[in-house]
Image (cartoon, rainbow, N blue to C red):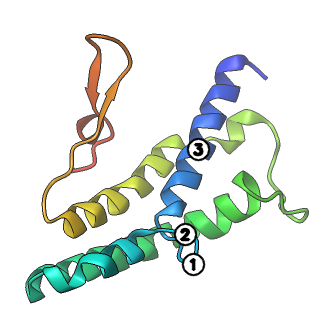
Amino acid sequence: MHMWMTEIRAIENNLIVRVCRFDEEGRNQTGLRTALRSIETQLADSERKDANAALKRFRQAINPLKTQKRNKISVHLDIETKQAHDADSLFDLPGVIGHCRPAVHAVDAIAGARVSYTLQSGRYEKVDLRVYCAIDV
């Protein structure tokens, strides 16, 4: 496997795990549902409805990502998974980035404003990830 394939796979797995973390809920976990509950009383009814609707869309959108990619490949190695182990067949980075859209929109709804995401890889190199990943398209 080429080094770049390994890196792309690592990026894909990292995105999958991070996006799915937004849906976790438990005593020691903080996800978007917990975040929304912590500020619900401060929101107007319309804002609360919008945030709940965005959160519901997010949870529905990532369910296949959680059950198929995260649970069977990225986090747990399901023994019955019948997926080729060659790197080319495993990549779906555009699909994974597509699953980021509902998460970003849910965060926007909870925050009550458009949240910016900037990647800075050097002193002058800044990338607006909302534009780069076509989040608002």
Residue 49 visible from this viewpoint: no
The residue at the point 29 percent across, 66 percent down is 106
Whether residue 103 is situated above or below residue 127 in the rendered picture:
below
Of residue 86 and residue 53, the one placed in the foreground of this image is: 53
Q: Residue at x 91, y 62 (%)?
A: 79
Residue 75 position in % (x across, y down): 73, 56
Q: Secondary structure at mark 1?
A: loop
Q: Which mark is residue 54?
A: none
Write down the residue under mark 3: 14
Q: Are marks 1 and 2 in contact (CB under 8 Å)?
A: yes
> Which numbered disc, 1 or 3, marks the residue closer to the eye?
1
Which residue is under mark 2? 29
Q: Nearer the viewer, residue 27 or 48?
A: 27
What residue is pinned by disc 1?
Answer: 26
Q: Residue at x 8, y 84 (%)?
A: 44
- Mark 1 neighbour density, 10 Å: few (under 14) some (14–19) many (20 or more): few
Element at badge 3?
Answer: helix
Residue 83 x %, y %: 80, 53
| Residue 40: image location, x then y, percent | 23, 83
Q: Mark 2: give few (<14), some (14-19) or many (20+) Cα within 10 Å.
A: few
